[in-house]
Amino acid sequence: MIQEYNIRVLPEVAANEQRLIDYLVNEKGLNKKEINATRILKRSIDARQRTVFVNLTVRAYVNEVPKDDEYRHTVYNNVEGRPQVIVVGAGPGGLFAALRLIELGLRPIVVERGKDVRERKKDLAQISRTQAVNPESNYSFGEGGAGAYSDGKLYTRSKKRGNVDKILNIFCQHGASTSILVDAHPHIGTDKLPRVIENMRNTILQCGGEVHFQTRMDALLIEGDEVKGIETNTGQTFLGPVILATGHSARDVYRWLAANNVEIEAKGIAVGVRLEHPAHLIDQIQYHNKNGRGKYLPAAEYSFVTQVEGRGVYSFCMCPGGFIVPAASGPEQIVVNGMSPSNRGSRWSNSGMVVEIRPEDLENEELGMKNEELLQTGEGGSSLNMLFLQEHLERLCWQQGNRRQTAPAQRMADFVNRRLSADLPESSYAPGLIASPLHFWLPPFIANRLAKGFQQFGRNARGFLTNEAVMIAVETRTSAPVRIVRDRDTLQHVRLRGLFPCGEGAGYAGGIVSAGVDGERCAEAAAQYCEVL
Ligand SMILES: Cc1cc2nc3c(=O)[nH]c(=O)nc-3n(C[C@H](O)[C@H](O)[C@H](O)COP(=O)(O)OP(=O)(O)OC[C@H]3O[C@@H](n4cnc5c(N)ncnc54)[C@H](O)[C@@H]3O)c2cc1C
């Protein structure tokens, strides 16, 4: 017999199978001798009250042995000799598109400008050592895309649960822990992601697909109103319909599209800073305990959102027990982002703290973009204006950071009180920090809203607004500044047949899972286009 229970237990019970069995025996009347195994199906932490509980859905196998697999397998057959589809970009959008193409009997040719996920790691280490960013291999470019060296958070606001579950199951099939199927806020961790990504690549290769690293798409091959393939910097031409999954940092791709009159439009983004607290402080606040998280709870998360003067101000992509990383993808830029290892065990917890900005806000003088040079209105200009805003802020930050990757930073309470920080706390950001008056040089549109947002968050969570926390500038790559406009039904570009704008860079996803879901959808649309569906 299989029995399932929704229970609410203390963290030490949830963390130990024997204690869980004892709980089921005592509270649910099961006979200990008859329980062969238990399996946790869902897990979430309820830290709203002083005593923290863990909500579990648990399955008990009573006089039975588990026969079901812990995850659903997808079958990938050989696709050699089948029609080919070009997938540009090996981020989650491109990788899940390629795997879905195989499922549907099409042969993916994946073209990726960066290096494979292991080689790429060496270039990431170089950023802190030499202060230089390799424009083809960095936190945005390379196998695994922007999500490879990240926290690997896998939760999404997507309502289509079936699609999300499939993505999570495919991650498990390629080596991710099955805990991602159980946790309310699953994550993989930057130490585990590279192996999972390699395994996904191996599936593509073993089934007869191709993966070309250090191969950058430089142009689409367009005939009339149809895309026939791509040209690359290696001099190769690849023919077939194109799934364009190049992410939000491929500014050369956006510029090429604008210059070649391929319809794109400016899109709202959110901009701000990374905020870093000591992890134990966030644990104390969120778990209402001066001793912090204790032995059985994970590093605590938070999520804040408010409205200030008509724009959203919110925490973004929180990394409990993580690190702040230099995520620029080219010269003369500072961009920060966050990642965490699977155990979320670092001494710091960080999160993006950002302000929503809409294309119409570019007209607002407080954003400092009204200068003609910054707000270009020439050919392709207005559709790229949000991109120009990102570039402007990233360059400004680089100038404030001494023209290196040392990032300008300010203590949180000092920022709110408009004071320069005399010194800075220890930080996880490896290239180093430089004390800087962010309240003074960040555009008032952003700085004033952030300050008011912080005051609000400090009222909601006592101890959060503190000088123990440091703000590090600048977080600009929260989503794409451009939408590559596509048809709702066919997912093809609005004018060009055979072109499938995909994932975050196209403006149709935000985050690893939603990019993966969109990759699958684009593969299905490409299969329809190739008439195999
Ligand atoms: C440090 C960091 C941490 C993050 N943490 C999380 C997290 O924990 N959870 C989460 O959900 N999201 C996270 N994100 C965001 C997430 O990574 C992205 O939403 C996701 O990767 C988008 O997937 P994508 O495939 O659409 O694009 P990308 O992942 O950006 O992939 C695009 C790929 O295309 C390649 N490419 C670009 N131009 C070309 C070209 N011309 N020719 C060939 N190849 C090209 C790039 O090299 C890249 O590999 C994080 C991002 C960063 C940078």
Image (cartoon, helix red, strand yellow):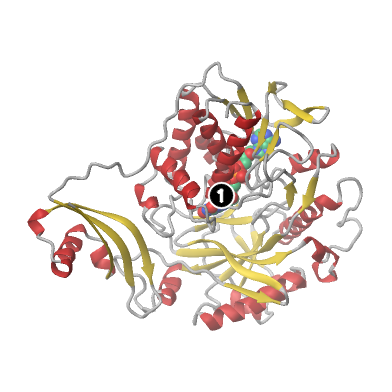
Q: On the rendering, which quadrant does ligand 1 occupy?
A: top right
- Name the residue type under label 1: Ser
**Residue 140: percent from left, percent from top:** 62, 45
Residue furthest left in the image:
33
135 or 239: which is nearer to us?
Answer: 239
Secondary structure of residue under mark 1: helix
User: Height in image: 266 above or below 330?
Assistant: below
| Quadrant assignment, res 344 | bottom left
Return the x and y of residue 135 as percentages of the image width and height.
68, 40
On-image quarter of the C terminus: top right
The yes-or-no answer for disc 1 within 8 Å of ligand 1 is yes
User: Can you identify the residue that label 1 sits on?
Assistant: 514
Q: Where in the figure is residue 116, as x and y percent of width and height?
A: 54, 33
Quadrant housing residue 273 = bottom right
Residue closest to the far top? 81
Q: Nearer the viewer, residue 136 or 174?
A: 174
Q: How many marks?
A: 1
Residue 209 visible to an observer of this rendering: yes
Left or right, 198 with reference to 392: left
- In percent of the image, x 66 and y 73: which residue is there? 450
297 with respect to 307 (left or right):
left
Q: Residue at x 84, y 62 (%)?
A: 369
Residue 145 visible? The answer is: no
228 versus 330 height, above or below:
above
Identify the residue at image location x=92%, y=58%: 372
Badge 1: residue crowd in 10 Å (few <14, some 14–19, many ≥20) = many
